Structure formats: structure tokens, C-alpha cells
Amino acid sequence: MSRRPHHSSLGGKTILVAGASSGIGKATAMRVAEAGAEVVLVGRRLSELQAIETAIAAAGGQAVSVQLDVTDTAALGAAVASLPRLDVLINSAGMNIPEPIAVVTEQHYDRLFGLNLKAAFFLSQAAAAKIAAHGEGGAMIHITSQMGHVGAANRTAYCASKHGVEGLVKALAIELAPINIRVNAIAPTFIETAMTAPMFEDGGFRAEVMSKIPLGRVGVPEDVAEAAAFLASDGAVLITGTSLKVDGGWTAQ
């Protein structure tokens, strides 16, 4: 029986990376550009996006920067609609405010859900329309969290928002399958980024985290970027509606 070759190149694909200015988003943008994609860098900090754009160009890749707050639904829809083409969405925009439920304010709740879930929803809506326009299918990848599969103290709002994105991914995968748009999540463990740096300054917190990861280390942004590049590629052509846990075994226990 003949088998199709494994396709891991992203040449010819236009990939929008939301939250591209730092951390996981930055590493992912660099990785998919390296694999041949033309990358649309989306984030609030234009100078940081342009620095990444310059680095990608210096390495022989292609990228364009779009300054955008993805919580501005109208601006988000207009920006995606204006793109010449879109094949893949990778959404890395997100935030966390660790605190006990007793002190969670409505303002903090709205900020978390506004970015983590509402923006993910409307970014998916806009991207689905744009990908469908060329009729060749494509993919969406949402960076969620291992906390979208388990619970943890001081993370009630964060866990709820990430569980919501995991549900969104499953529903989108079913709804968009007839037009050949694959939708998946990547659920990382704690990753060494600017967002987690203050947490890891607490030696006790770091030790507690390490004790829950069987592989014995926290992640780096490149761990997630590799998973995203795979799910964006034709090598993942039959993968949809799933969550790839890049968590060192945390959720296996």
C-alpha cells in the first residue's frame, strides 16, 4: 500500500500568530517562519513585533507586523479581513492573575475572560471566514494550558477561561471540519517566560512545580513552538479537536 510522504514544511502558508511580541508567541513565530511560512505578527507592542520581523527577515524568512489589541473585537475583525490570505491561525495571546477566589474582582475576571476566551472566540470567527475564503482548508491552534485540564488553587478564573478555550476548540473542530479547517489546542505546563518569571522567583513555588512534572523540568517557549509548527503542517492532516499537552507528564498523574 502506498503512503503519502510526511509534510512538515510550512512553505506557501500564511500564518497569523497572535500574541507574537514575546514568550511563546515570539518563539512560535520564529519557528514557523523558519519552516517557510509567511508570518503575520500580531500584538500590542509594535516595536517588539518589528524587532521580530527584522530577525525573521535576517534569517531569510518573511513576516509583517500588525499592531492590534485582540480584545478590540471590531479592530480584530477588520485586521483579519484585510489580509490577502490566511491559512493558519496560532493564538498565543493570554494572561493570568494568580489570586485566591475570595479576592477576585469583577475587573480581574473580565480582563482574564476578555483576553483568554472572548478574544479567542472572535479571533477564531474572523480567521475561519478568512481561511474559508480561499477554499483550500487550513488550521487553527490555540495555546491553552495544562490548567485547561486540571484545577489549581489561586487560579479559579484562569482555569475556567482555559477550560472554556478547550471546549471552544472541540466545538470548532466539529463545525469547521466540513470545510477542512482543523482546530486544535496546545496545553503547556509552566513555561519560562516574562509572565512566569515573578512566580519562579519564589524558590518554594518552583520546587512545588518541579515536583509535579515527571520529566523533571519546566518548559521553554521553543517546546511549545515545535508543537505548533507540527499542528500547523500537513503532517497533522488528520488531527483535529484534540489538545496536545506539552506538560512533561503533569496531567498524566
Image (tube, rainbow, N blue to C red):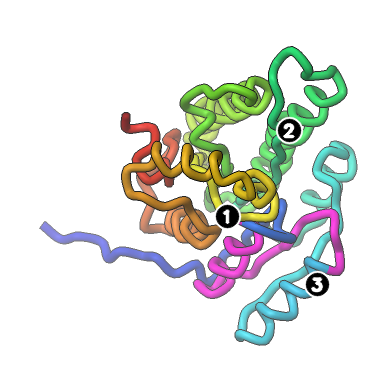
Give how far apart the Cα atoms at labels 3 and 1 are: 23 Å
Q: Nearer the viewer, residue 114 or 242?
A: 114
Q: Earlier in the sequence, mark 3 or mark 1?
A: 3
Q: Quadrant of the C terminus?
A: top left
Q: Is residue 248 above or below residue 242?
A: below
Relative to residue 112, is residue 34 drawn left or right?
A: left
Going 19% across and 60% down the picture, which residue do you hit? 3
Q: Earlier in the sequence, mark 3 or mark 2?
A: 3
Type of amino acid at the residue the image marks with label 3: Gln
Mark number displayed over residue 97: 2
Label 1, secondary structure: give it. Answer: loop
Q: Quadrant of residue 244?
A: top left
* Residue that badge 1 annotates: 192
In the rendered image, residue 37 lying in the magenta stretch gets the answer: yes
Q: Nearer the viewer, residue 203 or 214?
A: 203
Q: Is residue 27 visible?
A: yes
Type of amino acid at the residue the image marks with label 1: Glu
Label 2, secondary structure: give it. Answer: loop
Give how far apart the Cα atoms at labels 1 and 2 are: 16 Å
Residue 12 rendering spot, x and y as whole percentages: 55, 70
Q: Nearer the viewer, residue 166 or 135?
A: 166
Going 42% across and 35% down the picture, which residue do you hit? 242
Q: Is residue 222 above or below residue 60?
A: above
Going 69% across and 80% down the picture, which residue do you hit? 55
Q: Is residue 182 visible?
A: no
Pointer 3 local density, CA inside 10 Å: few below 14, some 14–19, many at least 20: some
* Residue that badge 3 annotates: 50
Residue 26 rendering spot, x and y as whole percentages: 65, 62
Give the extent of the magenta segment: 24-47
Pointer 1 local density, CA inside 10 Å: few below 14, some 14–19, many at least 20: some
Residue 96 rendering spot, x and y as whole percentages: 70, 36
Tell how many labels: 3
